[in-house]
């Protein structure tokens, strides 16, 4: 998979990092190469579920230690993991893997994690919908489903540019043929001269929401979606509008935070406010207020949420504003993971950034920059929030926690959405 942000293990779980060797490398397409990784100690790898990912640690000369997360593109086998990596022009680790990771190369691997998984014994029809390198979790899923002999219909739908860019085509065809209820459909947007003659694809062009609606059981199926952000927007939002309920709509979220349920580009967030002059380190402000008084006043306010979490992401402070915005009382929130206010599809990206911030001691959201993201209320309703964070450090400058100031901007978001819709309607009428 392309270098991306994702989680490697659940918060609070001690990271299990082991030495692995590259056992094999397999050229899957012009841009994608698979690397089969086996534990150096000869034991079995930690178990994983089809669709999960792992953290890969490599030491690159003149660059240093690097960490990237890659989807495990193989079903569990008790012997090894397979990752399938797209060579990115600016990808430090992906280029190193393609150029230098040969059989016998040592790397380190963290525990598998992630909740974008298909159940071993799925009960509903299942649609695996992907584009580009987003198919890597789907390959693991179809392998896992085929291994169980599942009789529930499974439809593997993938869009690629052409045969040169299409990885795992023959493998998916063979896997589907081995399963009594598995079908595979490949779309090529720019098929090459030999692609049709070789039977590499089924339909020329891009897969559309109308095609999916006409050829899959929209009212019954579980949908798993992975691909570039525009692809996610088309199908997550489109299927939701067709009536696919949230419990049947599963997607892995990479890239910039945006609203996948919008037909347009969604909320971009307000421009950052200009930075203000620092208050200073004095304990007594000129007007006679102490910093402690000001701090207590802000924390006790019911306007904006102030949420403080420790280095592992457990909530240690929850003010009245947080209760107002998210609906959890202080007693319900304290000690809980920040997951209680993060929608499930966004947790992987959040925790990867959280860990990186704790490890590096730096954050780009503490100097006036606002991060606009979806939030989750106690009643399960999604809201739009903006926040900044401040890192809490001990005397040795080690990050021991984070304090976030959070504002509910749902009303503004809905107004912006309505305005965009009105503008689009006017443009459509030629106004």
Image (cartoon, rainbow, N blue to C red):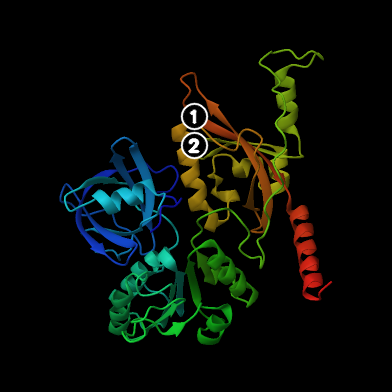
Q: Position of residue 205 (x, y in %)?
A: 49, 80
278 with respect to 63 (left or right): right
CA gap between label 2 and label 1 equals 8 Å
Q: Height in image: 252 above or below 302?
A: below
Q: Position of residue 212 (x, y in %)?
A: 53, 81
> Which residue is painted at 55% across and 86% down in the image?
214
- Residue pointed to by mark 2: 357
> Which residue is painted at 81% across and 74% down in the image?
430
- Residue pointed to by mark 1: 399
Q: Height in image: 409 above or below 289?
A: below
Residue 417 image label:
none
Q: Position of residue 240 (x, y in %)?
A: 61, 72
* Along the line of sight, the residue nearer the viewer: 72 or 134: 134
Please identify the quarter of the rendering in which residue 295 is found.
top right
- Does the image show residue 182? yes
Q: Are marks 2 and 1 in contact (CB under 8 Å)?
A: yes
Q: Quadrant of the C terminus?
A: bottom right
């Amino acid at each position: 998979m392309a270098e991306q942000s994702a989680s490697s293990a659940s918060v609070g779980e001690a990271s299990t990092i082991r030495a692995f060797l590259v056992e094999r490398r397999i050229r899957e397409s012009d841009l994608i190469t698979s690397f089969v990784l086996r534990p150096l100690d000869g034991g079995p790898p930690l178990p994983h579920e089809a669709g999960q990912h792992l953290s890969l640690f490599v030491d690159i000369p003149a660059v240093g230690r690097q960490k990237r997360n890659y989807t495990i593109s193989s079903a569990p086998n008790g012997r090894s993991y397979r990752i399938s990596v797209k060579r990115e022009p600016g990808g430090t680790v992906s280029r190193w893997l393609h150029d230098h990771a040969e059989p016998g190369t040592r790397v380190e691997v963290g525990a598998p994690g992630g909740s974008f998984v298909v159940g071993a014994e799925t009960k509903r029809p299942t649609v695996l919908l992907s584009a580009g390198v987003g198919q890597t979790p789907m390959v693991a899923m179809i392998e896992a489903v085929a291994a169980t002999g599942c009789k529930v219909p499974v439809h593997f739908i993938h869009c690629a540019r052409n045969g040169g860019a299409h990885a795992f085509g023959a493998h998916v065809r063979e896997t589907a043929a081995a399963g009594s209820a598995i079908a595979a459909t490949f779309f090529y947007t720019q098929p090459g001269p030999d692609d049709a003659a070789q039977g590499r694809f089924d339909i020329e062009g891009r897969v559309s929401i109308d095609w999916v609606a006409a050829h899959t059981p929209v009212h019954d199926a579980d949908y798993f979606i992975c691909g570039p952000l525009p692809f996610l927007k088309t199908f997550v939002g489109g299927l939701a509008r067709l009536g696919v309920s949230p419990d049947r709509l599963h997607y892995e979220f990479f890239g910039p935070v945006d609203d996948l349920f919008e037909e347009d580009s969604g909320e971009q967030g307000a421009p950052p406010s200009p930075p203000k002059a620092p208050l200073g380190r004095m304990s007594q402000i000129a007007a006679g207020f102490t910093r402690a008084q000001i701090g207590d006043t802000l924390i006790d306010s019911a306007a904006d949420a102030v949420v403080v979490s420790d280095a592992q992401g457990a909530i240690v402070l929850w003010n009245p504003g947080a209760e107002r915005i998210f609906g959890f009382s202080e007693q319900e929130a304290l000690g809980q993971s920040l997951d209680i206010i993060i929608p499930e599809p966004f947790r992987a990206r959040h925790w990867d950034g959280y860990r990186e911030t704790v490890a590096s001691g730096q954050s780009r959201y503490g100097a006036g920059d606002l991060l606009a993201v979806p939030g989750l209320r106690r009643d399960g309703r999604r809201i739009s929030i903006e926040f900044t964070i401040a890192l809490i450090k001990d005397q040795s400058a080690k990050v021991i926690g984070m304090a976030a100031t959070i504002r509910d901007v749902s009303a503004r978001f809905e107004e912006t959405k309505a305005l965009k819709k009105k503008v689009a309607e006017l443009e459509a009428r030629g106004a």
